[in-house]
Amino acid sequence: MTTATAHPHSPAQPRVLRLDPADNIAVAVDRLAAGQSAFGILATGNIARGHKMAIAPIREGEPVRKFGTVIGIAKAAIAPGEWVHEHNVAVTGMAAEHSFGTEGWQAPVTAPATFEGYRRSSGRTGTRNYVGILTSVNCSASVARFAAAEIERSGLLAQFPGVDGVVPIMHGTGCGMASRGEGFQILQRTLWGYASHPNFAAVMMVGLGCEVFQIGGIKAAYGLDESDTFRTLTIQETGGTRRTVATIVDAMREMMPAAAAARRETRPAAELVLALQCGGSDGFSALTANPALGVASDLLVANGGTSILSETPEIYGAEHILTRRAATPEIGHKLMERLHWWEDYTARNGGEMNNNPSPGNKAGGLTTILEKSLGAVAKGGKAPLAGVYEYAEPVRQPGMVFMDTPGYDPVSATGQVAGGANVICFTTGRGSAFGCKPAPSLKLATNSDIFRRMSDDMDIDCGEVLDGVSLEDKGREIFEALLRVASGEQTKSERLGYGDMEFVPWQVGAVM
């Protein structure tokens, strides 16, 4: 984020920010009533918190600028003092210029950071020590839930305090789909990513038996063998619901000792894989939580770690910022290939990429997808773009990378976790209620009001940036909290029990 200029304020004078000298709009931090002034201009109507007021004449067809960047085109002439929003701003007729691998990066200076994690035989490190019950198909979802409930009711977990809990991973697909092709491959990658996730100490995979997505197929594809940490069964072969539940409980009783034997040890921050998420954005997301998370992401990358930026539809219009930061031109072109895929995907489904934000985003002050995308990209900090991955593809190299996912938070986060993310930072201005077991999720409130109103859900108040806390200081606060959570400190969403229902694999292709 560029250096913002604040209009001097007092209890009678609301806070208003001009984010770049080139901007022709300013953002109301506090509600600006009709007749109140900012930058020597009288508001011609009420301007809500997070919304924009014109501070210079904008003729019809001229660009509207925020962060020094074009976020839209004026539909009609906009006079100084007018509210600037979707009624007078459009995004048609705009095209960004792309360059590839043209920007350098000065890594922040940071002392080597560590956390206490579970080193797995795979060479990866977990931040939690769960056991999981995965399902190959929706038909086995209830059995997984029944078995998890029975394990908790039986007192088995109390005998193994080193295990963080049992997680049923349920979903709505696995059958009524093609047995090959893009959709099948995505589901296979996603389930394998969870089955092999370092936050799971042991996993049981449960199927019905006759589904399209056969357990035997995934075992063959990945060379899996039954062991004391990985077992499979089907309801039909086991003999129905009650017998399957009893069999799962018995198997978990045998697997628990190996899972409970894991111990935390000091590990370098380089072994953290951070999923960057935002949902329920508002007009402050791009001013506070997102760029502060970008600072934390840069600190992690400087320590040799990995951060995963995602939500392809929500970087649309700002992708040129990422292509300039690509470590190689090939990486930048791969990102563009994914965007072109999305243009085709949305067109054949009767949609478009150049859409407005959601109703909640609009109410919070976001006008165009370009404005939202600029804020979303800020989560990735300033580090080079080190790689581009398809949905749920294993993330292999460190650095700031991009994973192609939808913008819908549960689907996006599911792909990131399947790719190896062992912790999540989730920014929100509207108060998204979310968790994503087995990965802990830190909630970053973009404004202090939502932090106070949803204090049981929010972990960090990034609204303090609007009161003078620097982005650098808030970013370091996030990074330090990230290390504590990775070492076992529970997030608010974990304390509330979120995460059992948020496994939502991306369904691409026909449901038959």
Image (cartoon, rainbow, N blue to C red):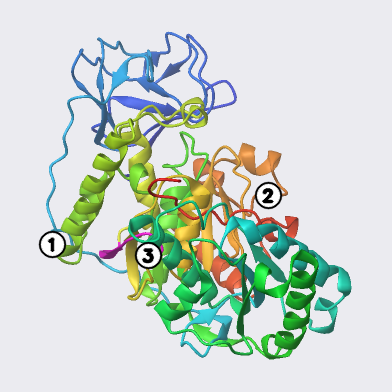
Query: Picture quarter containing residue 152?
Result: bottom right
Residues at discs 3 and 1 in contact (Cβ within 8 Å): no
- Which numbered disc, 2 or 3, marks the residue closer to the eye? 2
Quadrant in the rendering for residue 137: bottom right
Q: Label 2: how many residues lie within 10 Å, few (<14), some (14-19) or many (20+)? A: many
Depth check: give the residue in front, 421 or 509.
Answer: 509
SS assignment at label 2 = loop
Residue nearest the observer in this picture, 110 or 370: 370
Judge left or right: residue 353 versus residue 236. left
Q: Which residue is mark 1?
A: 329
Q: Which residue is painted at 44% across and 49% down in the image?
A: 290
Magenta range is 383-392
Neighbour tally class for label 3: few under 14, some 14-19, many 20 plus, Cα within 10 Å:
many
Q: Please say whether residue 274 is visible from this viewpoint.
A: no
Q: Residue at x 56, y 65 (%)?
A: 136
For label 2, the residue is 457
* Real-space CA distance between mark 2 and mark 3, rounded to the nearest whole angstrom: 25 Å
Left or right position of 159 against 86: right
Residue found at x 45% / y 61%: 187
What kind of residue is marked 1?
Pro
| Viewer-side label of 3, 1 | 1
Query: Mark 2 or mark 3: which comes first in sequence?
Result: 3
Q: Amino acid at mark 2?
A: Asp
Count the labels in the image. 3
**Res. 433 mark:** none
Q: Is residue 215 above or below residue 286?
A: below
The picture places residue 335, in percent across and down from the top left corner, at 23, 55
What label sits on residue 298 in the rendered view?
3
- As drawn, is 93 to the left or to the right of 456? left
